[in-house]
Image (tube, helix red, strand yellow):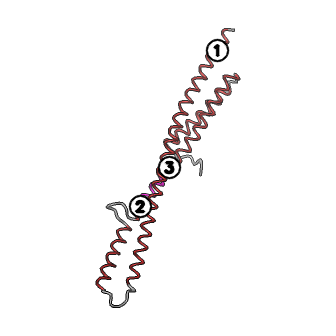
Amino acid sequence: MSGGHGAVEGSNKRVALLISVLALFLAFSETLGKASQTDALGANIEASNLWAYFQARTIRGTVVKTADELATLLPPGTSPEATQAKRAEWAKTLARWESEPATGEGRKELAAKAQAAQEKRDLALERYHHYELASAAFQIGIVLASAEVITGVVALVFAGGFVGLAGAALLGFGYFAPHALHLFH
């Protein structure tokens, strides 16, 4: 009888070790998931701000273009030189608003920055989804392994370990190759 008790105790220690390892990976997965979620939210806000600035530049450009068109309709007697000077100033402003590499605040540069922020957001969301699935797998693995201690059904430990390995694979894909698996497309 004492031999059987020692075997059960040794088995329980191995199950406890498996549960501990799964819990460790669950903690990694949850931490990486929250970081990815935060990155996605920040990049989404950045993209929204950049697109709003882009739209403001577009609206301002439309106002200046309209003023330029109206300037051609000025009544006779208006100084043609003053009109031409103002129209030249407006054309220069419109060109600067379209592309301003020095400050990065032209429409062209703003669109590129906004698209880059959207790509960053999308990558963070891909990672987040992998980490969430990995967390679920680790939690299921912990539950299955814990159930073996109560029921004595050894298959539950193997199932828990297998689900934990699947979680580890998802964790790895989320970290190293988030676009390799298209889980939510």
The amino acid type, in three-letter code, at marker 2 is: Leu
Residue 41: image tag: 3
Q: Residues within 10 Å of mark 2 (few under 14, many from 20)?
A: many
Q: Is residue 121 magenta?
A: yes
Q: Image check: 113 left or right of 154? A: left
Q: Name above or below for residue 8 compared with residue 92.
A: above
Choose the circle earlier in sequence order: 2 or 1.
1
Image x and y of residue 133, in percent: 59, 41
Magenta portion: prevailing SS class = helix
User: Foreground residue, 18 or 106?
Assistant: 106
Q: Residues within 10 Å of mark 3 (few under 14, many from 20)?
A: some
Report which quarter residue 80 is drawn in.
Answer: bottom left
Report which quarter residue 93 is drawn in.
Answer: bottom left
The amino acid type, in three-letter code, at marker 1 is: Ala
- What residue is disc 1 on? 7
Q: Residue at x 52, y 42 (%)?
A: 174
Q: Name above or below for residue 106 compared with residue 16.
A: below
- What residue is disc 2 on? 110
Q: CA distance from mark 2 to mark 1?
A: 67 Å
Q: CA distance from mark 3 to mark 1?
A: 51 Å
Residue 146: image tag: none
Q: Residue at x 37, y 62 (%)?
A: 105
Q: CA distance from mark 2 to mark 3?
A: 19 Å
Camera-near label (3 vs 1) is 3
Image x and y of residue 32, in percent: 50, 39
Report the magenta residues as a range.
Answer: 113-123
Quadrant location of the N terminus in the rendered image: top right
Q: Image check: 24 left or right of 72? A: right
